[in-house]
Image (spheres, grey):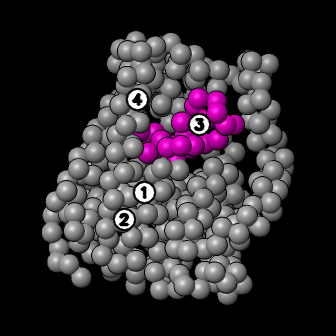
Amino acid sequence: MKGRGSFDFGFFVTVMILLSFGLIIVFSASSASAFYDYNDSYHVIKRQLKWAVVGLFAMFFMANFHYKRLEKLSLPFLLVSILLLIAVLVVGNEVNGAQRWLGVGGLTIQPSEVAKLSVIVFFSARLAKTKDSLNKFFTGLLPYLMILGVIAALVIAEPHLSGTMVIVLVGVILLYVAGARVFHFLLLSLPAIAGLAFAIYKEPYRMSRVVSFLDPWKYKMDKGWQIIQSLYAIGSGGLFGLGLGRSRQKFLYIPEAHNDFIFSILCEELGFIGAATVLILFIILIWRGIKIALNAPDAFGSLLATGIISLIAVQVLINIAVVTSSMPVTGMPLPFFSAGGSSLLFIMAGMGIILNISRYTNNSRG
């Protein structure tokens, strides 16, 4: 294996710009609701800054922690994430009808965020050794699908449909990249779609989101309120935006505007130019991540980088689709931007892993 070099500077700079940009927008989007809820306009940004500092430590630690060591830790990591997912169903904190958070003292974590990264590490470690058997359904592909099924069942029980979708999609991407047959996925697509439809039909709030997605203006005072306010924010931003800090929709029109709908506030304040800049930054990040994956020194590193950068790509696509009313509303954070401690922490740890992989590629100085 090639000796350790410097990490991919372009990837690192892009991460830091996105993180900095995200913190600025979190403050702008949260100031009004934070003052209303806590009488402190800085409440949310102070908490997000603390997590950003912890996330930076996690990134730099993982950037210097040889990624090959994660192979041996992959199974314990997966088992711990499963235990955390079980624990959150038993003793988790319930917020707005969802039991997704574990609290320890003043610290809360979201086990589904742990599960996202643990699935990527475990699948990458095992697929690097057994990918040749994936063309066999029962002895090759099925064991991985069963693991995904267990994780998905635990996450959707919280309930957390969007988290389930991300974990399954990233798992499928890894299996496809490792050599699983498209024919098998086509066969599984029908039961998967049926299962998703049942999960939506089973919960009235999910069904109402689908109904309001089809005609939000018909339900503009209740079920369609959030998405309509999001579209107002995006539309009023125009080409150059109203100016940083000058959003109108953040004044309690969009519920918790600093979370899943933060991109709407970004569009309103910075306009098409600002939104396009952010999307270009994400495209650069994904491109550099794919480049690192393609030039990784071994199969494990390649799959690991692919899984982590796919996690970013899937979340960005779903978040943008939701806030632009291109798909029904679902709780999907925008990486680096949406307020949320455990999400930011594990994203930054993932970026550190990719940076570490880049230190062993032939393009580490590219």
User: Residue at image x 46%, y 81%?
Assistant: 128
User: Residue at image x 53%, y 16%?
Assistant: 235
Quarter of the view holding residue 295: bottom left
- The CA span between labels 1 and 3 is 18 Å
Range drawn in magenta: 315-341
Q: Can residue 158 be seen in the rendering of this structure?
A: no
Nearest the viewer among 57 and 312 is 312
* Amino acid at pointer 4: Ala
- The CA span between labels 1 and 2 is 9 Å
Say whether disc 4 or disc 3 marks the residue closer to the N-terminus. Answer: 4
* Above/below status of 328 relative to 2: above
Say whether disc 2 or disc 4 marks the residue closer to the N-terminus. Answer: 4
Quarter of the view holding residue 63: bottom left
Nearest the viewer among 309 and 104 is 309
The residue that disc 4 covers is 276
Q: Residues within 10 Å of mark 1 (few under 14, many from 20)?
A: many
Give x and y (percent) for residue 107.
Answer: 43, 54
The residue that disc 2 covers is 293
- What is the number of the mark on residue 309? 1
Give x and y (percent) for residue 20.
Answer: 28, 38
Give yes or no for contact between labels 2 and 4 (Cβ–Cβ under 8 Å).
Answer: no
* Amino acid at pointer 1: Ile
As helix, strand or loop, the secondary structure at mark 3 comes to helix
